[in-house]
């Protein structure tokens, strides 16, 4: 009890630079606060997108809308399968999508999921799903954020918060997409690494696929384009790809779509709007989705 009191006082009274193990920020990068608010108004959509920033910066809901496809992008910063599973358990029945586009990449399956957990805890009232997510991750920062977040939820401390729709060159687009101010990538060195599944991420991923199957929702696993040097930084990318193929419909656009590192990306991992347009048009041709 003393710890809870001190934690809440710590969160309320001390400046952020003094809260190394308590990170709680409303409206952080990625517009998750606004995305949650919009999600609560959605029902019976055509396509649901899940994944990290490669999702919310990669699947442009306006392009889908132009083809009469109602799409909602539930991506979040550094989202891993643990958080994707949480979001699906909360919202899948309500959103009732005909198809899920689940963005995958090697880093999401090997990450600890802490960063994304903090984003979700701060920007949506906590429930049993965020509680079990906290237990699964079992990290001090996530535990502290969950306790502090429950306090703020209980006393409605976030009621007056309004998130700016345009900030730091990012514009929130209805449906969950975030458009980056047009910029072009400068090549940078990305260290090489070997892909390995994190056991917790793999179990959440498999549970998520079972959830889709139980609801009768089709799912495509999509690896969006990254720069050639970012893609090659995974020295055993063939292991990742072969594993994804074993789970079902998998599309690696790094092998299917030729883009320019300097013209179609704004950094090593993220498409600029030129690249987004090319990627989405190619994707929609492949999945051949019919909304009716």
Image (spheres, grey):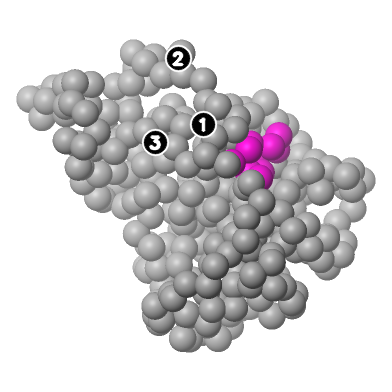
* Residue that badge 3 annotates: 121
Residue at image location 66% in from the left, 76% down from the top = 254
Is 140 displayed left or right of 184 in the figure?
Answer: left
Is 45 displayed left or right of 233 in the figure?
Answer: right
Residue 77: image x %, image y %?
48, 49
Decide: few, some or many residues near mark 1? Use Cα within 10 Å; few <14, some 14-19, many ≥20. many
Q: How many marks?
A: 3
Decide: few, some or many residues near mark 2? Use Cα within 10 Å; few <14, some 14-19, many ≥20. few
Residue at image location 34% in from the left, 13% down from the top = 155
Query: Which numbered circle lies on residue 192?
Result: none
Is 67 displayed left or right of 39 in the figure?
Answer: right
* Residue that badge 1 annotates: 33
| Distance of label 2 from label 3 (alpha carbons) | 15 Å
One can see residue 202 in this view: no
Q: Do the CB atoms of the residues marked 3 and 1 lie less than 8 Å apart? A: no
Q: Earlier in the sequence, mark 1 or mark 2?
A: 1
Q: Earlier in the sequence, mark 2 or mark 3?
A: 3
Residue 62: image x %, image y %?
79, 43
**Badge 2 element:** loop
Frontmost of labels 2 and 3 is 2
| Distance of label 3 from label 1 (alpha carbons) | 10 Å
The answer to whether residue 287 is above or below residue 57 is: below
**Badge 1 element:** helix
Range of magenta residues: 170-179
* Residue that badge 2 annotates: 159
- Please tell me which residue lies in front, 212 or 214: 212
């Amino acid at each position: 009890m003393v710890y809870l009191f001190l934690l809440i006082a710590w969160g309320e009274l001390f400046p952020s630079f003094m809260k190394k193990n308590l990170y709680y920020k409303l409206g952080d990068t990625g517009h998750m606060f606004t995305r949650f608010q919009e999600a609560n108004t959605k029902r019976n959509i055509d396509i649901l997108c899940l994944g990290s920033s490669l999702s919310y910066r990669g699947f442009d809901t306006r392009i889908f809308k132009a083809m009469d496809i109602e799409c909602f992008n539930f991506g979040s910063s550094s989202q891993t399968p643990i958080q994707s599973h949480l979001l699906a358990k909360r919202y899948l029945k309500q959103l009732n999508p005909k198809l899920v586009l689940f963005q995958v990449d090697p880093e999401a399956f090997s990450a600890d999921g802490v960063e994304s957990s903090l984003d979700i805890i701060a920007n949506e009232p906590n429930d049993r799903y965020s509680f079990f997510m906290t237990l699964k991750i079992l990290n001090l920062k996530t535990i502290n954020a969950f306790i502090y977040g429950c306090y703020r939820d209980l006393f409605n401390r976030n009621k007056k918060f309004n998130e700016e729709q345009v900030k730091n060159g990012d514009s929130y687009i209805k449906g969950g997409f975030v458009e980056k101010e047009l910029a072009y990538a400068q090549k940078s060195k990305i260290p090489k690494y070997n892909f390995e599944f994190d056991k917790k991420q793999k179990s959440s991923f498999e549970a998520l696929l079972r959830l889709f199957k139980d609801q009768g929702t089709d799912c495509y696993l999509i690896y969006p384009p990254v720069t050639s040097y970012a893609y090659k930084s995974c020295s055993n990318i063939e292991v990742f790809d072969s594993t994804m193929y074993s789970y079902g419909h998998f599309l690696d656009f790094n092998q299917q779509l030729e883009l320019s590192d300097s013209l179609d990306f704004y950094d090593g991992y993220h498409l600029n709007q030129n690249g987004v347009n090319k990627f989405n048009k190619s994707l929609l041709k492949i999945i051949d989705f019919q909304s009716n």
